[in-house]
Image: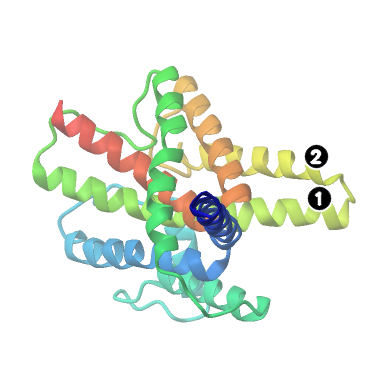
Amino acid sequence: MARMAAGSAGRRKRSTVGERWAYYRDATPLPLYSLIFIFPLVAIYEVGALMLRPTAWPERRLVAQGAMQSLFGWIGADAPWLSGAAIILVVTLLCWHVFSGGSWRVRMWVPAVMIAESIALSIPLLVIGRIGATMALHQATSGASFESLRADLILSLGAALYEEFVFRLAVLVIVLSALTHLFRAPRGVAMAAAVAVAAAIFALCHVRPVGAEAWDGVRMAVRLAAGAYLGVVFLLRGLGVAVGCHAAYDVIVLVGAARD
């Protein structure tokens, strides 16, 4: 009887773990969990950027955020203290959740596990950077001062948030929808093409005249590979984990460079 009871308990435990994993796997790509996961990053970035804007990175800008801000200004809401990019991101995810008819019930252990998954998924990006002989998607300087590191960390959060929104949630999804619905392309082909197009635009937007960097073949190859990888993460794991993966990579690189 004791053995039977122990075996039954073991099966229940395995069943519970399996059920939690299935729930986590299916829940993390949902817009509500993406919003809950990235909202603290949005708050940290927007407050930090507002505090540092008068003195930090006058010559540096986030192309993705600038595009979103321009869209917001186009409809007349262009107050300097109002972050149109943040509002667009939050409202988009809220509307997506409402129109999808999803449940508002939240299990708070899910965002906690998303942090661990994001860190783990950043490892291939580090490998890509090593292979490409460059250590960051954004330039990192060794031995940076605390003030410079703080500004770079805040900027990297904005890059993770708004680049994933624009290049993955917007560009990738639009290309994927066009290929599948307008051109009737097979789903696999459409997904591969959408990932490639979004990665190419992501890479090109970092160099002049759109971005601030000069053309460099190695860095461009790294960005293409990184953009493709983040596109796959987005398709498989959703916006929240893609943002977390991007942010974890940048933070690891910046902190590591500052310690050298």
- Please tell me which residue lies in front, 57 or 17: 17
Secondary element at tag 1: helix
Depth-wise, is mark 2 or mark 1 nearer the camera?
A: 2
Q: Residue at 37% across / 23% down in the picture?
A: 134
Is residue 156 something that shows in the picture?
Answer: yes
Give the labeled residue for mark 2.
Answer: 189
Q: Nearer the viewer, residue 196 or 209?
A: 196
The residue type indicated by label 2 comes to: Val
Task: Determine the CA span between mark 2 and mark 1.
Answer: 9 Å
Give the answer, above or below, for where 34 lies relative to 178: below
Q: Which mark is residue 77?
A: none
Note whether residue 204 is visible. Answer: no
Residue where numbered disc 1 is placed: 179
To which quarter of the image does residue 27 belong? bottom right
Judged from the image, the secondary structure of the residue bearing numbered disc 2 is helix
Q: Quadrant location of residue 43? A: bottom left
* In the rendered image, the vertical position of residue 255 relative to residue 127, given as above or below: below
State the residue in front, 125 or 214. 125
Residue 83 appears left or right of 94: left
CA neighbours of label 2 inside 10 A, class few (<14), some (14 to 19), many (20+): few
User: Which residue is pictured at 42% across the width and 46% down the height?
Assistant: 118
